[in-house]
Amino acid sequence: MNSFARLALIALALPLLSSCASLTPEQCETGNWRTIGLSDGAEGRPLSRLDDHREACGKVGISIDTGAYMAGRDEGLTRYCTPVSGFSVGSNGRANGNVCPAELAGGFEAGYVLGSELHAAQSALTQAENALRRAESAESATEDRMRDLRAAMVSEQDRDKRRAIGDELRRLRDTARDQQRQVRRADRERRDRQHHLDIVREDSFAQLRLLAPGWAPGSRTRDLCPNKTGRWSASAIAFSLCPKRQREDIHGAYRSAGARRGSGIQGTLRSL
């Protein structure tokens, strides 16, 4: 490879390499590390993101203000680690990154369980819809083939060829009957999955409203029972600020989610 070709490859590779970096050199030079940490925390980024920043900025000789970054990240996590955020992550089929501190993990986890159940129900419906489309497509292809054969039968004069067409038509009629049954089964499965999704959605929304009063589909409400700083917390102090009836409802929502997910949420309940 000549020098010109090598230089051309390097020139093409540089933008790709820089696009993989967590921060650009300009961001390293001008970045407010508390703001960067706040953004990463609010997006639920893992702590390893700090190592990515350290590597990116180290290449241009810039060190990170770890203290400012961590202070911002902690603040960002209070925005991320909420029941509504957990529900959003779960319902979009994303993994639980387990980034929330212990005092905030309970609310996020409860919302995540509800969202994951909704995602599973939606995925099951999508699979059923795809199966129905495949069954209908196969049935349609058979009908088209039978239509073509009937037309060929009308115009065909050769007796042997007409017999062969008739034999194929009989086989296709049997196939068509089987495919019709498959379509009916697939349609029943789709309707069952749709019904199940409707139930799961209604239950998930009801549970989430208990965990985050005032929340509605499409809203951005993040608080459960806010403490004096307006942040949701699973601590006994913040929980005690909720009205008694609301505390009982929230306990019920946690128990329901905990029974499905395991002892982690139950442990949070015992601490409240």
Image (tube, rainbow, N blue to C red):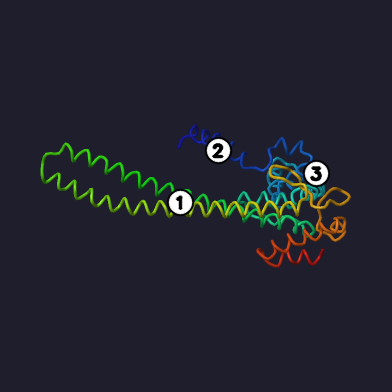
Task: Tell me the tag on residue 256.
Answer: none
Question: Disc 1 marks which residue?
Answer: 187
Q: Which percent across, then down, holds residue 167?
A: 19, 50
Three-letter residue code for mark 3: Arg
Whole-angstrom CA distance, mark 1 to mark 2, is: 51 Å
Three-letter residue code for mark 1: Asp
Whole-angstrom CA distance, mark 3 to mark 1, is: 54 Å
Task: Tell me the tag on residue 13.
Answer: 2
**Above or below: residue 36 compared with residue 101:** above
Whole-angstrom CA distance, mark 3 to mark 2, is: 32 Å
Circle 1: element type: helix
The crowding category of the residue bearing disc 2, from other C-alpha atoms within 10 Å (few below 14, some 14 to 19, many at least 20), is few
Mark in front: 1 vs 2 = 1
Residue in the image at 85% along x and 48% along y: 230
**Above or below: residue 211 compared with residue 1:** below
Of mark 3 and mark 1, the one earlier in the sequence is 3
The crowding category of the residue bearing disc 3, from other C-alpha atoms within 10 Å (few below 14, some 14 to 19, many at least 20), is many
Three-letter residue code for mark 2: Ala
